[in-house]
Image (cartoon, grey):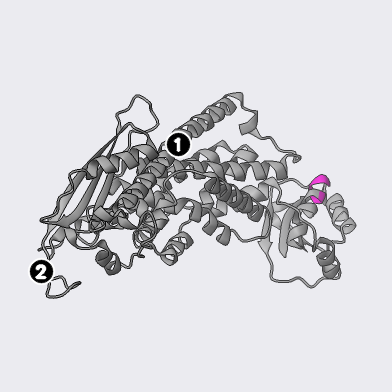
Amino acid sequence: MRLVRALVTEENRESVLEALREKDIDFVLTDGGEESVGTSIVEFPVPTDGLGDALDAVRDAGLRDEYIVILSAENAITPHAEALWDRYATDYDPLRPPELRSKARDLSQDPASYAAMIFLSAIIAAVGLLVDSTAIMIGSMVIAPLVGPALTAAVGGITGDRAMVVDSVRIQALGLVAGVLGAIVLSAFLRYSGYMPTALDLDAIGLIGARMAPGLPSVLVGAAAGAAAALALTTKGSNTLVGVMIAAALIPAAAVVGIAIVWGESLIALGSAALLVSTMAVVNLSLYATLWILYRSREFEPALLGDQTTTRAGILTVGLVVLAVAIAGAGTYQQAIFRYEVANEVEAVLDEPEYESLSVVSIRTQYGGIDPFTEAETVTVTLAKSANASYPRLSARLYERIAAATGPDVTVGVQFSSYQRTSSQEGNSAARSSQGRSALDWAKRVDLPTVDSRSPLSKRTVSSAPSYPS
């Protein structure tokens, strides 16, 4: 329920009151006071879904937007209250542009507090990503105030408020930078404090591997979240849960960028940055498109659409973003495919009888990218073996399998880490070098999930092993 207070003059008083009577809206009229001679204050309650209809009626009757206050009311007991409830109960009536702009401004925050909340949210998200915890990830999304600036940008665009759009875009950019910095700070602390290993295979962590490049799912999530936010803004719906959905599309990607930067995974960082920027663009475009559909027949000046210079600049910006995202996404996707195929073929070779005693310490790939003029891809496989074992043909065998799967333009190198073993009976190990220790011990220490030994990526988890003292 909404309570409307408006200032009416002697010229439009009767026409405004008659418009309210025609709508069966009950009202009270009070004198405007000594400082407003010849004016009155009309006050009337109306259901939220009927607010736009009531305001249209009194404005058409001559009410000017000099003094209109809209308040929230718990309940209203008037002769026609129940009839109004029944009339507007099933109506969908979006807010009028002035009320829409006011509601959007209420969602905005000052840049400092906004950046601080995004910074902390990204720290929590980075922890959730590194320990592969979905629960922690959800917690980071709840506290991220991402919905406000995105909504104000779309509302500014649809109502022609250029200043609102510029401020909102700046705050959104600040939020993205703050999110990446938060993830960098947390990741650097965990890595250089020794809690996390310096050699960490990021794409072997499920939550990180799913956010390495833009894709159709991210576009669909961003578009749906933006449309839902627009619908919630234009009605009496809450924006809180919609904000969580927008944060789910953006905060994890920002955290992956920071993590990849700290661990030196430049292509993963590039792909995640492309995912972050593209998702943010999709959310904003979806918000704007939804509001444009809802308000395209309203009589207000969409200045940002009518300005040809702004329109050209917007089209150029969108085109550049799409091109950059496409290039980065293609490179990251091909890298992921390349790494997966390499891991698959390494496992297949080590399953052969003559190599079954070997275990993987790490698999490092240097991917050339999508440019045909770049250098060849390089694969370095580090294996743990007993001190007296020799495998002179292993690199050639690995090359045969990897080249058959990925193409001949690849260089394969093999490094060995030897260990000694002494036991009184089969299966009891007394001595083992630092490189021979399984990364699963470390994975359990930081609550990372183990990988099924049947998976092509199972042997790659050993690349996350830290160095232990002998």
Q: Mark 2 points at which residue?
A: 422
Count neighbours of disc 2 (C-alpha within 10 A) and say few if under 14, some if 14 to 19, many if 20 or more.
few
Rendered image: mark on residue 272? none
- Dominant SS in magenta: helix
Residue at the image point whose x is 48% and y is 43% from the top: 214
Residue 286: percent from left, percent from top: 61, 44
Q: Do the residues labelled 1 and 2 touch (CB within 8 Å)?
A: no
Mark 1, mark 2: which one is toward the viewer? 2
Count of residue discs: 2
Q: Quadrant of the C terminus?
A: bottom left
Counting from the top left corner in percent of width and height, residue 313 is at 53, 27
- The residues tagged by marks 1 and 2 sit, at their Cα atoms, a distance apart of 49 Å
Magenta-highlighted residues: 57-61
Residue 23 is a magenta residue: no
Residue designated by label 1: 330
Disc 1 secondary structure class: helix
Q: In the rendered view, does 12 fall on the left or right side of 271? A: right
Residue 96 visible in rendering: yes
Quarter of the rendering containing residue 398: top left
Of helix, strand and loop, which one carries label 2?
loop
Expressed as whole percent of the image width and height from the top left, the position of residue 273 reads 41, 42
Question: Where in the figure is residue 409, as x and y percent of width and height?
Answer: 32, 31
Towards the viewer: 461 or 95: 461
| Residue 38 appears in the rendering | no
**Residue at 36 percent of width and 62 percent of height:** 453
Relative horizontal placement of residue 24, taking residue 350 as reference (left or right): right
Q: Is residue 158 above or below residue 48?
A: above
Q: Which amino acid is tagged 1?
A: Ala
The amino acid marked with disc number 2 is Thr
Q: Is residue 188 left or right of residue 291?
A: left
